[in-house]
Each structure stands twice: as C-alpha cells, then as structure tokens.
Amino acid sequence: MTEVLSNSNNNNNDLDDRNIAATDLKAAEDKIQSLCVSHAATFVAVERRGAALTASLKNLLAALEDATPKVEEAKECLEMDSHGGSASASKSTSESTSSETNGDKNRNSLAALAEKHRMRRRTLLQHSSLLELLEMPSLMDACVRGHLYEEGLSIASFANTLERQHIGGSNDAKNNDAPNKTNPIVANVVREVRKREVDLRRHLLHRLRSDVTMPQCLEVVTALRRLNGVELERSSRESANGMNNIDLEKIHEAMEWRLQVNFLEARDVWLEGNTMTSGSSLGMASQHSRKLGKRMVSSGNSEQLLDNIDGYRTRCFEIATQFLAIFRSSSTGSYTSTSTKSDKASQLLSMWTTRRIDTFLNQQLALKYLPLISDTATLRDALESTTFFATSMGRIGADFSPLLPAYFIPRLVSIVTSHWSNGLSALQDTLKVCRDAGVASPLYNSREVISHIGTEEEGDVVGAGTGVIGNKTPSPPRQLLSLPPLARLVNTFLNGLNELRRCLLASAFPELRLFFQESFVVKVKAILVENERAVLKPGFLKSKGEEAGKLRSIAVEMKDEFDNCVKPYLSIALEVAFGDFENLSSNETIPTESDSPDEGDIEEEKDEEKETEESVEQVDEVNEGDEQERLLQSKDSADGAPEEIAEEPVVEAETETEIDSLIDME
C-alpha cells in the first residue's frame, strides 16, 4: 500500500512537472513569437544584406575569373623580362603571331613601364624649365610691348636653337639610320615665337614713324638687322639641310634693300603727318584772316608759312642724313663690294629725294603756300627760305634751285598786275559814277598847278620840267594834278612797281612788259574811249544837266592826256624799274607843263561850256521848276562824291625819295 501510495505520489509529481514544463514551453514560445514580431525589421535587413553579400561574392568571383588572363599575361611579361629577349625570339620563331599583339605586350612590359616612369620623373624634375619654355611666346610679347628689343631678339634667337636641336631637319637627318622626329610642343612654341617676330618688326617700324633722334633711329635699325639675321640663320639651316637651294647672299641683299625701303616709308609717314598738321593750321589762320577782312597772309601767318617751309626742310634733311649715316657707313666690311652697296643706297635716296621735292613743289608750295601770299615782301621771304632749302639739299646732291622761278614768277606777276587791275577798276568805276550822276567836279582840279616843289638831283631823276631820263624812277608829271582819276591810275601803277621792287626777279620782266603793253594800256584806252562815246551820245546834255558839257571836255582831255603824257611816263617808269635803260631812246622825254594848253585855249573852252549851258537851259525851260529841283539833288550828291572818290593819292616811287602828292584838294 505504501508502495502504491508512493507510486501514485510519484506519478502526480511527474504529471505536475510535465504540466509545468508544458506551461513553460508555451510561455517560451509566446515569448519567442513576441520577440520575432518585435524584431521583424531586423530579420528583414539581415536577409537583404545576406542577399547583397551573396551577389557581391558572385561579382568578385566573376572579376577574378576575368583577371585570370591578365595575371597570366603579367606573369608571362615578367618571365620575358627575367629570361631576356631569348624567350621572345624563340616564341617569334616558333609561333606566327600578329605584330600588334607583340607590340602590346612589349608596351606593357615591366621595362617599358619602368622607362615611362623614369621619363615622368625626369619631366617632373624639369618642371620649371618646361614652364619657362611654354612661357616663351608670352614673354616675347611682353618684351615687344615694353620696348625691350634686345631681350625679344634673344628669345627669337633661342627659338632657332630649339628648332635646330629638337625639331626634325637637323644635320643628323642626312644619315638614314637617324630617325627624323619632331617634338610637337617645341614646334608649337617655335611657331608662336615666329608670330611674335612679325609683331616685333611691325612695332619697330611703327616707332620709326614718330619723332626719333639719331641714336634711337640707329637702335631701331640695329634691332631690325638682328631680326633679319635671325631669319637669315633659319634660311641658312634650311639650305644646309637640302630643303631649299637658295643663295644666302641674294637673300641678305634683298633683306637690306627691304630694310632701307621700310625705313624711308616709315619716315615718310612722320614727315607727311607733320606737314598736314602745319598746313591745316596755316589754312585755318588764313580763313580767319579773310573773315576779318584782313590780308590773306598777315605778319603772324607769314612767319608761320616760313616756319612750315623751314620745318619741312629740316625734316627732309634730317631723314636724308639719318639714311646716309646708317646705311652708307655700314657698307664697309659687307659681303659685297662697298661701291656697289653705296651706289644702291644712293640710288634709293635719290629716288626718295626726287619724290619729296616734287611733292613739296607741286602739292605744298604751288597749292598751299603761294596762293596765300598777297604781297611781294612775304613772297621774297618765302623765296629766300625755299632757296635755302634747295641749297641745303644740294649737300646730298639734290639742289632744286633752278626749279623755283617756274613757281614764284607767276605769283609775282599776279601780285604786281593785281595792283594795276585794281587801278583800272577804280578808273572805270569813277568815270561811270560821275557820268551817271552828271557830276564833273571829281574829275578835274580847278586850282593852279605848282610847277616845281623842292629840288631834285641832276642826273638821278627826271625833273618835272626838264624831261631828262636818269637812272631812277622819274617824278610823275605835275599836270596830272588837274585830272585826279589819271593820277590815281598812276598811283596804282607805281604801287605795283613798288611791289616788284621788293622781290625783283628778272625772269618776270617779259611777262610784265607784255601785260603792260597788251592788257593795261589797251584796257585804259578802251575805258577812256567808252567814256568819251557815252558823254558824246546824243541827248546826254539834256539828261545830265549843266555839267554835261564839262564831262565831254574832260573826257576828251583825259584821252589826250593819257596818250601824250601818262602812257610815255608809265613806259619810262616800267623800264627804269626793270633797269633796262637800253630800251629807252635818247630822245624820249616826258611831257611837261609846257606841253599843256595855253591860257587862250582854256578861255575858249570856258566860252564853249557857257554856250552849252545856255542851250541846255533854253531846251528845258518848260519844266524849269522840276528840272531845277533835279539838278539841285544831283548837285548835292556830287558834293559828297568827290570826298570819297577824289581822295588825295600818294604816289610811291621805286626810290626812297619822297614826292609830293599829285592831288592836293581841300
């Protein structure tokens, strides 16, 4: 019983333990489920990472499989490098593989890679030198802009050295075994330096176009010659390499000739620039003077004109002197004979001076300077300055003095004849005004003419009453005092002779004599004849009033006085001014007061004038009141006219002897 109870107790205990264990198991399962639920995201992440790791391992295996041939190839390359070239030679003889495959293997060999590595290390060590090499074009550009010509030429010469050492075409290229290699970097640097050489030449020539002194000019020409030497060195190397069969002597001669031409062209630009500036300023000043009603060339403008001529002379002579000093002195020791090179330089200089002189005479002197001159004093100064210019150029064999009269004589004739033409215009206007107004008082002087005033030297001048021709300009006839228009005409004629005296050119005498005979005298006679016909026209007495008869008598008297007195006197004065006493006949004299009409003739003329006035009064008796008023108005206008027309003219003679005025009116 006891055993039964104990067995039952044991069974109960086992049952309780199983229940407890089942309960604990269920609780553990519940706990595990709760933990799985709470850590579900972790499980998912672990799963994903596992999948990614699996894919990476597969890729790694694939990469290893792909790298296996390369490892084998590297192993073979290492074996080839260790065993030397025998293995490659045996392989090439045993197998007929492609050349491309062998080339790739050789390039990827350890020796080739080591050589590349060494080359890169050497390049890194020469980094500063290579940087300077690449900066050569920009450095030369800076030298050109900074006027550092010596440094720029040194860079250009160094570019030739680089081209000779590192670019194909060296002397070793003649050997068939020597490879002809070209470094593209060095070739590019040399090409850029060549472009800067062109800029350097253009900059040097541009400097010659400015105002440079002799040392500066010599410095520029020396730099240009060195630049030509750089080009000649390159040409000589090409000729030595057999690239071009050229004659270096001819190339050097052509370069020197081109340098001389460029020098003269550049200096021409400087010369023409200064000439245009001075010419424009002179033209503006002359226009301003004409606007103010002054003479065409005043004293200030005259000095400016002379300064322009002198400046042109100075610049031309300076250019010629610089050319001779630089190019003729450098001919000694040249590859050609001294005489040949000097002759070529002289020929070029002669062509340049001929062109400059032609430009000065035809464009400057004839078109700009001479048309602005209106008096012979300025013309004489311009002639002296131009003559000095011509004689100065004679020191270099370019004296153009014989060409000057062809330009100055026409201007001298124009100035002198302008005074004579003004006298003709004044005579014609005076006669026309008096004729239209019917006033005769401005045309005559009713006061007594004094026969002699002062004393005159015998044998030097023509006495007023003697009519003897001497070696000086004769005094004007005193009887011209009675005819003021003719006196003014004589005044203007003598003014023209005074202008001629200030600039006496013998080559102008024939033209002046021809103008006097065929133009001046003919026009004066035509004016007097026209005036006489106008006053003798029928109906003139009725239309012009009481002084119409006096106008007729004065017209006849002026015509006779010109033929008998004025014309001979002007002819003698002209020949005396020319100094041509041989053309003066010994019996040719000037009419004096003794040749004038006597008192009886004057009384007869007065009686005729009175009869004419009485006839006019009878014809106009019907409209006496209106006619008298008209005559009074015309007379009032005539009273004012003589003050403007019949001013007292001063006759200027060629000598310094002062003569009395021909007209003495109150």
Image (cartoon, rainbow, N blue to C red):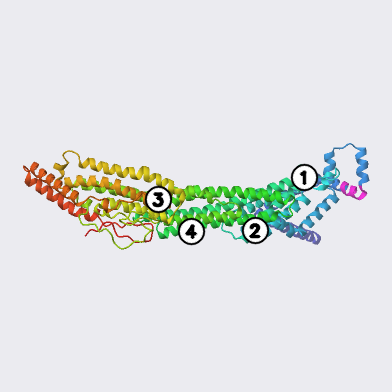
Q: Which residue is mark 3?
A: 575
Local secondary structure at mark 4: helix
- At label 4, which amino acid type do we have? Asp
Q: Which residue is mark 2?
A: 218
Q: Nearer the viewer, residue 185 or 625?
A: 625
Q: Looking at the picture, tell me which residue is in the foreground, 271 or 490.
A: 490
- Structural crowding at the residue carrying mark 4, measured as other residues with C-alpha within 10 Å and reported as few (<14), some (14–19) or many (≥20): some
Q: Tell me the distance, in whole angstroms, between the alpha carbons under discs 4 and 3.
A: 36 Å
How busy is the neighbourhood of tag 2: few (under 14 within 10 Å), some, or many (20 plus)?
Answer: some
Task: Indicate which disc, 4 or 3, sits on the residue closer to the N terminus.
Answer: 4
Q: Is residue 412 left or right of residue 563?
A: right
Find residue 307 and name its label. Answer: 4
Q: Nearer the viewer, mark 3 or mark 1?
A: 3
Residue assigned mark 1: 239
Residue 296, visible in the rendered structure: no
Q: In the displayed structure, does residue 623 sit left or right of residue 104?
A: left
The mark nearer the N terminus, 2 or 1, is: 2
Question: Of circles 2 and 4, which is in front?
Answer: 4
Measure how far apart labels 2 and 1 are at the Cα level: 31 Å
Label 3: state its secondary structure. Answer: helix
Question: Which span of residues is magenta-colored?
Answer: 76-84
User: Residue 166 at x, y = what percent?
Assistant: 77, 50
